[in-house]
Amino acid sequence: MNIIVTGGMGHIGSKLINKLSNIKKIKKIIIIDNFLSERYISFINLKNRDKIIFFDENLIKFDPKKIKINIDCIIHLASTTNAEKSFLNKKKVLDNNIETTNKILKLGKKKTKIIFASSTSVYGSQFKIINSKNNFQNISPQSPYAESKIVCENIIKKESGNYCIMRFGTIFGMSDGMRFHTAINKFCYQAVLNKKITIWRKFYRKKRPYLDLNDCIKSIIFCIFNDKIKNETLDVVTANLKVIDIIKQIEKVKKINKSFVETPILNQLSYEVQSDRLDSLNFKFNGDLFSTIKKTIKKLDF
């Protein structure tokens, strides 16, 4: 099996690549990443390099003719992220995410499996509980980032004959390409540096979906090799949590100070997302909020 991973040096990709390279069935892994976020440590720590083909290039400008082997699966992680900052560059976020999605469809064949990293941020607030029975009805993106994910999902559904759209909860946990602008990771980083933990005021007691990075990696690998998953949209969530409960877990490890701030993101209601389709396929989530917070702070702390 040969696999392409776009955005392979990022938060998810940097950990995923090293997991994939340990799987015997996988012969070659092509990484396309232009180091826009400058996570060079991800490149330094690549394992099993005999399996890796690396392109340090802009995906939008990438020439598909450079792919000299048959591709069985494309994992599309490359994306302009950060929902809050996407309001400052709406057109750029939309254009970039749409163009990269159009490009990955040219890198394989119609039967090539496309795994697309979408987000539970595409949901609005029509339902308090979202599952496979209503996740197609509850689309009301509240940021340009979330809006771009829906557009990309629709492109893939139209153009691909074999896809798995994975709507990830907010990722938390460590990797070489770790990001610190999302809730739990950001809180841990701020706690270690003795900074005030900045909390979106209206979200403090709202419940939202979160995904342990290890569960995220495990779910992607599960979808690669599961033939039952074809042309589906899956919700992938370890736990639905309130920010106040996350803060309480951090306080068990580190003394902190809180600061409440405003956000332009409109959707400020509570909702839960259930991973019932994955549950039905006997996928098991193993992530644990407190142990991950403890490990993250221990790793980052001085």
Image (tube, rainbow, N blue to C red):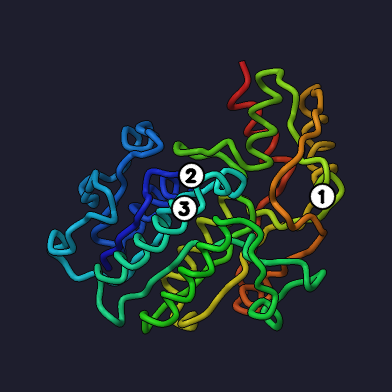
Q: Residue at x 37, y 33 (%)?
A: 38
Mark 1 residue crowding within 10 angstroms, few (<14) / some (14–19) / many (20+): some
Mark 1 element type = strand
Q: Front-most of 232 and 198?
A: 198
Mark 2 element type = loop
> What x and y, as percent, mark residue 191?
71, 25
Tell me the amino acid under the disc marked 3: Val
- The earlier-in-sequence mark between 3 and 1 is 3
Identify residue for label 3. 93
Mark 2 residue crowding within 10 angstroms, few (<14) / some (14–19) / many (20+): many
Mark 3 element type = helix
Quote the CA–CA distance across marks 3 and 1.
28 Å
Identify residue for label 1. 242
> What x and y, as percent, mark residue 241?
78, 52
Identify residue for label 2. 11
Does residue 156 appear to the left or right of 190 in the view shown?
left
Q: Front-most of 3 and 198?
A: 198
Tell me the amino acid under the disc marked 1: Lys
Q: Are marks 2 and 3 in contact (CB under 8 Å)?
A: no
Q: Front-most of 94 and 31?
A: 94
